[in-house]
Amino acid sequence: MTTTTGTTMGRAPEVEAPRPPVSRAWLAGAGVVAGGCAVALSEATAWTLRADTGPVGAVAAVVRDATPGALAELLIGLVGSADKPLLLGGTVVLLLAVCGYAASWVRRAPLVPDLVFLALAGIGFAALMSRPTPTTGAALALVVGVMTWVVTLRLLTGPVLDDRPGTDSEGRRTFLKRAGIVVGLAVVLTVAGRAAGGVRRGVEQSRRLLRLPVTPGEVPRAADLRVDGIAPWRTPDEEFYLIHTALASPAIRPEDWTLRIHGMVDREVRIGYQDLVDRRLREAWVTLCCVSNPVGGDLVGNAFWSGVPVRELLAEAGVRDGADAVLQTSQDGWTCSTPLEALTDDRDALLAVAMNGRPLPVDHGFPVRMVVPGLYGYVSATKWLVDLEVTRFEDVSAFWTERGWGERGPVKTMSRVDVPEDGATVPAGEVVLGGVAWAQHTGIERVEVQVDGGPWQDADLGAAPTTDTWVQWRLRVEVEAGDHEVVVRATDRSGYTQTAARADVVPDGATGWDGHTFSAR
């Protein structure tokens, strides 16, 4: 008689089913987390080593520089001051998307994710090298990012790639634990790197401790017409418009700042910050305006500036015959070409060190910027100025002129309605209309106002200490109940009256009359 043990006669032993292949979504998630950690630690390293920019900022700057002028102007018009955060954020989102997609191939082609990330690193390195001041710190930040990616990706994908039977749920739990740990470490190290860098805070502290021989300037008694709703004659620092291409404002300590003057000069001049402020400082009210300011826009402001006349430094260098331009360069590499005569004539073109009686705010160009009355900022108002090259327009190109904007950029005569606000409702009867007008280095002669298509009426003008500042205007009118329209135009001291023809800001500033509609009840 035959017996059997351990098995049932005629039945094969049971074999545990293999684990199904892991979903590509888990691998993609690992790629996104690894890419995010790589970016975070790379930027933290850049902050710690006081690099001017990290890899992400450098790539975003290349995208910014490659954007055609018309498209850049359209985007700025759509998103305003959010353009730089959106550009940086969009760069990061795109990078993480690429990292996630590349990591989803790690099972089928294990080397693909690393090759893709190395290609991204190559793009970052090329972008860093294209910056005006590439540093070792920025390159090391990139290396840290690559190493973080390689280690983190393997740490996260290991558990979910384990094909052993019964490891499915355990592998995913391990993945989630490890992802939480590495994200936490990345956050801690990022915060630590930010704190360790402290460059901006150090510069801000240096700025606060500076004691410059400057005054805040006294607003002329008759300049402010004291009409509620009109822009104040002096624009406070925190309300002064901010337009620049820097993704992050350069942080320059005064003791590290140097200006070089060279090119078509008899002798090269180099000057440090203390040498500059030890000179005789000139102080002047000057209104600045951005070429991107549309009709009725607010990209214009008036402040009291303190600095050294540029003509004095150019005279020391000795400008050679034939020169007609000065190429200005910012610490972040931005350039503009300025007509030489605007820097050497009798206007208050200044290497400014103070604004409204205090050292320049960092975002407004600390420690030194250029202020030139009568020219739009894109051809004159360089922040964080470090280089002046005396040259000829035919021999150089600059950031915005390369993108189709005008070469010389004189400010156009302009006026604006501030009150009543567009669409406002006011009591019927006497209404005070008001606003501002400007024609820097030419001066405003007259402002005229038209109500409901009627005759033009001369408005009262506030005082202006020089032709380089704006003026406030005011007109009292009687209006009946109903809807009304007010239109304004200005005439400058050359005799030119604003044209009614509307023109876009490209290529050399907007034209047209500003107007508001309002209702009286």
Image (cartoon, grey):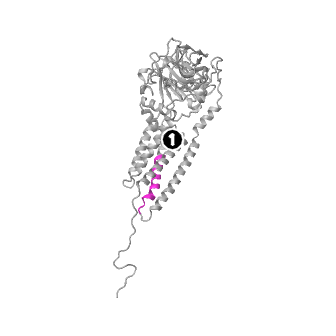
For residue 44, say whether it is visible: yes
**Magenta segment range?**
144-163
Residue 491 vs 121, above or below: the answer is above
Residue 479 magenta-highlighted: no
Disc 1 is placed on an element classified as helix
* Rendering coords of residue 199 (x, y %): 57, 38
Residue 299 vs 21, above or below: the answer is above
- Residue 271 is left or right of residue 113, and the answer is right
The amino acid at mark 1 is Gly
* Rendering coords of residue 259 (x, y %): 54, 27
Residue 303 vs 147, above or below: the answer is above
* Rendering coords of residue 439 (x, y %): 53, 17
Q: Nearer the viewer, residue 241 or 40?
A: 241
* Rendering coords of residue 257 (x, y %): 56, 30
Other residues around mark 1 within 10 Å, as few (<14) / some (14–19) / many (≥20): some
| Residue beneath disc 1 | 137
Decide whether the magenta segment is chiefly helix, strand or loop. helix
Q: Quadrant of residue 220?
A: top right
